[in-house]
Image: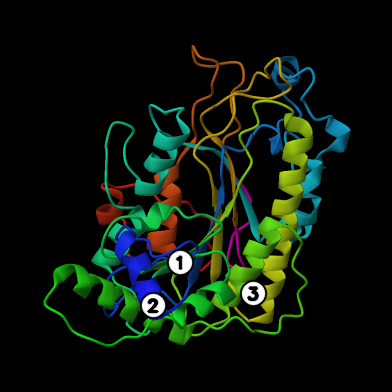
Amino acid sequence: MDRRRFLKLAAAAPIAGLAPGLATNLAFAAAPAGADYRRLLILIELKGGNDGLNTLVPVADPAYYALRPKLAIARDSVIQLSDAAGLHPALEPLLPLWRARELAVLQGVGYPEPNLSHFRSIEIWDTASASSQYLQDGWLTRTFALAPTPADFAADGVIIGSPELGPLSGGGTRAIALANAEQFLRQARLATAEGQTRNKALQHILKVEADVVQAAAHLKADHPFKTVFPQGAFGTAIGTACQVVANRPGVAVVRVTQTGYDTHSGQAPTQARLLGELAGGVVALRSALDELGRWDETLVFTYAEFGRRPKENLSGGTDHGTASVHFALGGRIAGGLYGEQASLGRLSGDGNTGYAIDFRSVYATALERWWNVASTGPLGGRFAPLPMLRT
């Protein structure tokens, strides 16, 4: 594929997209005093809506076993974290992080008036909007518009495992979406940061080329990690993320997507496999970041559009629910249980639970306590950060 073909692909693509596995947009700027983007944020999206009740199992609640006569996980199988709850057995590789207090388990993460549509609910999470509010820009896009990243960063953020920019969607941010770092570098060689024109459409294409060249100049994919990354799509995505992070200066945020959590049927084996892949990937991520000397300056969050309904269905699965369990990890995490266990004795009319932690409080923690960036602007209001970071 020559440069003309590359330009043709760019002209046909939307403002945030170039070609499969490659996207970038808009301008570079200097970070204001106070913002600390040397600290990395990694978001892991559990696409489809992971079942929180079988992730952190409420073993002391008889209502859990009554609602799930087939799907419930036996008490003697869980990885006990407290008298009341334990992790799914597939998450056992995370136990050393829990013991080291580098793992926080966030119970009941959700939002008021929840929406049970995949498309709309993830849009709410990605834009940090209220349930009835429709916003165009992702919450990270708004963050970087108010507090730009340093000019020498390769990009504001990198998206791995999905063509959707999610929290980096909208205009004004420098986002790269890629399947793997080597593919990006191969495609980037087709771009050249040269030429001028009065045609606005072509100006945009040339600007895109310049941004691709800028990003490629900072990103290499040949760091010799000792860490062995798991096989499979998620393990490969984690390896790609670590190659991106190995570049200095690099990016402020990396979002990795793991798919397959929409478990309407046959949930038990599917979730066990996915959670096992998640745990293996996270352990490899921790090992690789430790090799780079960056584990203590990395904050990892999981998120998803929603959880699953407490009552199992007739197909051996669970339907769309509301609040769920998520994880926060890192060398500066104050590990433990946060939020409140779902009250299974007080379900809503459609059989779902309430929420204990507004997801925007999780975002506020990253903005205020991690990056030292004011959160009220990007989040559209005040949400109290969680006390889960050590100073």
Label 2, on which residue?
Answer: 212
Picture layout, residue 383 above or below residue 237: above
Label 3, on which residue?
Answer: 289
Quarter of image, res 292: bottom right
Picture layout, residue 387 above or below residue 315: below
Relative side of 243 to 71, left or right: left
Work out whether residue 153 can be spotted: no
Residue range (magenta): 329-338
Residue type at mark 3: give it.
Answer: Leu
In the displayed orientation, state which residue is furthest to the left: 198
Residue type at mark 1: give it.
Answer: Leu
What secondary structure is the stretch in magenta mostly built from? loop
Relative side of 81 to 309, left or right: right
Crowding near the residue tagged with mark 2, few <14, some 14–19, many ≥20 C-alpha atoms within 10 Å: many
Crowding near the residue tagged with mark 1, few <14, some 14–19, many ≥20 C-alpha atoms within 10 Å: many
Q: Residue at x 47, y 79 (%)?
A: 250
Name the mark on residue 320: none
Label 1, on which residue?
Answer: 22
Quarter of image, res 308: top right
Quarter of image, res 165: bottom left
